Amino acid sequence: MIALLFLDGGQWPVLLLLAAMVACALVLQRRHARARRAMLGVRADAVAGAPVWLRTRAVCGALALLACGVAWLRPVGVGDEASDGADVALCIDVSWSMAARDQQPSRLGAVQRAIDAFVASPQASHTRLALCLFAGDAVLRVPLTHDAAALAFLANDLVPGAHGLGGTDPAAAIAVAQRALPAGRGAAIVVCSDGEDFPGNGPAAAAAAQAAGIAVHVLACGDEAGSKIPVATAAGEVFLVDGDGKEIVSRCERDHLAAIARAGGGRVVVADERALLDLHASTLLPAARAAAVRDGRLQPVALQHWPLCVAWLLWMLSAWLPERRR
Amino acid sequence: MIASEAGFTLAAAPYLWLGALAVVVWFVRRGRSRGIEFAAPASLASLPVTWRARCAALPQWLTALAMLSLLLALAQPVQVRPLPPTTPGSDLMLCLDSSSSMAAEDLGLGTTRFDLARRLAAQFVGGRHHDRLGVVAFARYSDLRCPLTGDRDTVVRILEAAAMVEPEGKEDATAIGAAVGTAAQALVRGGRKGRVVVLVTDGEENVALPGAEAEIAPLHAAQLCRQEGIRVHAIVVGAGNRKADGRTVPIDTTAVQQLTRATGGRFYTATDAQALASVYAAIDAMEQSPVVPAGMVAVGWWKPALAVGLLLLAAARLLAATWLRRMP
């Protein structure tokens, strides 16, 4: 499948300029008709011939200008065989709340399944992945690598509560991931979390990443009904309790996750098995390819000759049509 | 494709054939009468010739030039420029022995073999600008600490964070074959042609011993590496290993030497810090990637041609409807 991209899509105001040209042409045509009537009187058509194909020629001219406008935006096609993939940093929340079982086998397990499904797909072959772990702080566990199998292996070794300080700080993870990614290459950060954010500055960090040209997407884990957090102890499995001895019920903070994604110019997807695959195909890869084409790292198939060809033929048709019939 | 000496080329020259259509249209239009029938045309000859009259045909000429520019834009004029040469780089895995014997301080500078080896490895990594690098730390088990990456800073950080296993613990052994096998697998997944393993150890294989069929012996790892075109350079650090009775016995490097020989790599020993540094420098010099020409890049010039065409067309229409308006 060939994806259609407009490399100079930001120059869309050119279309407005061309529309203004069409409007001017119509006004001038009417003025010309009025002047003609004023000069030749009511017998103008009998003397000089009746205008014919007026509307057709106007439509042809307008369409030709529109086609030129489309060509100006530089349409290109990028095939699936393109070798440049996306650069993606996965920020996985490994705080205790990710042990909750409101998703099967657990919130973290759902993320691991999504990673496994992605790595097993052909889509992973050109993708560079990095792995960042976070709880109360964040660490870059795997730098950007083509070795998705090794990353999946290391991701599958993760268990909730295994890393760093207690708490959940997605902003720290986004900052660490941002440093691991090259700027301006259409790179993306995918935060895999249930949305707990103790410092509450996740959206601000996502906005900073977005300002640096890195989009922040979210894989939302858990559901809003919530679940207790099982913890394995020597005495068997118990549920995590707070300072008052009450069992903690952790819920997916979808609103906060949506705020992070919004600030980061990304999307929120539910962390199921196909989540990463779908996000990659629909968003991450097109963004990366557009950036690669803009940087000249990827040579796309130029398609501007199609609208130009249409414009040429329309102008030829317009010129060929007779202007008057006596 | 039509090319000029200045590097300009028409990437889609066949579109110029559409120009034939313009010629046909011109002939058709020429045959049509556009004026008003006038009884005494000779009397018009005496009228004064103004600039307006002289420029009467300008809109048609501008329109023709606009169509020519559009045709040129369709033919995709491009300027072909050579790109600067590049270095493709290699994939390089560092296998660092983290068994407790690496705690010996016999290389000088008052530091352990392990600390010196990883510090110098970090320096080595810092100089490999074009390569992808990875780290395997090994003792009884091999651990892929860092898959192949171009992020040298993180590789250095991972090397700095590496630690030796607990002395006399479950993991305190030396599985050279398994470590090289893990590194080789990572290199194969990397998919590049230039693949190198740098093995830094002070010991002898003591896991894949005869009878331990589930383990990977150094020679089996060598076969895998040779099959995949991976060179293994080995650096054996330290003068010898101290036994329980206090004697220092030389390291048996036979298996490691066979491993390097079988894969086309080099074998080094380093008995002090300076020697270790020069070994890293020698490997660095030996594993330089060649500089290769990067090819050409085509810069499109069709947009200026289109812009000129549209401007000429706008000018032609504007003139034809105002200053150079013709009747009927």
Image: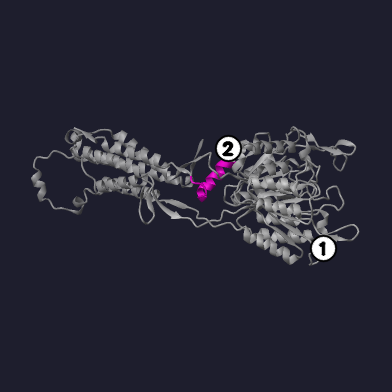
What colour scheme has been applied to the protein in the rendered image?
one colour
Q: Picture coordinates of residue B236 (x, y %)?
A: 75, 58
Residue A162 shows which numbered tag? Answer: none
Q: Disc 1 is attached to a residue of which chain?
A: B
Crowd class of label 2 (few under 14; some 14 to 19; many from 20; radius 10 Å): few
Mark pair 2, 1: CA separation:
56 Å
Q: Disc 2 is attached to a residue of which chain?
A: A
Tell if the residue under mark 2 belongs to the same chain as the one under mark 1.
Answer: no
Is A225 on the left or on the right of A33, as rendered?
Answer: right
Queried whether the magenta region covers residue B296, the answer comes back as no
- Comparing B259 with A210, the one in front is B259
Residue under label 1: B105
Magenta stretch?
A284-299
- Comparing A251 with B188, the one in front is B188
Residue under label 2: A282
Q: Picture coordinates of residue B220 (x, y %)?
A: 72, 45
Q: Please, is residue A141 above or below residue A276 in the view?
A: below
Q: Picture coordinates of residue A313 (x, y %)?
A: 33, 38
Q: Picture coordinates of residue B237 (x, y %)?
A: 76, 60
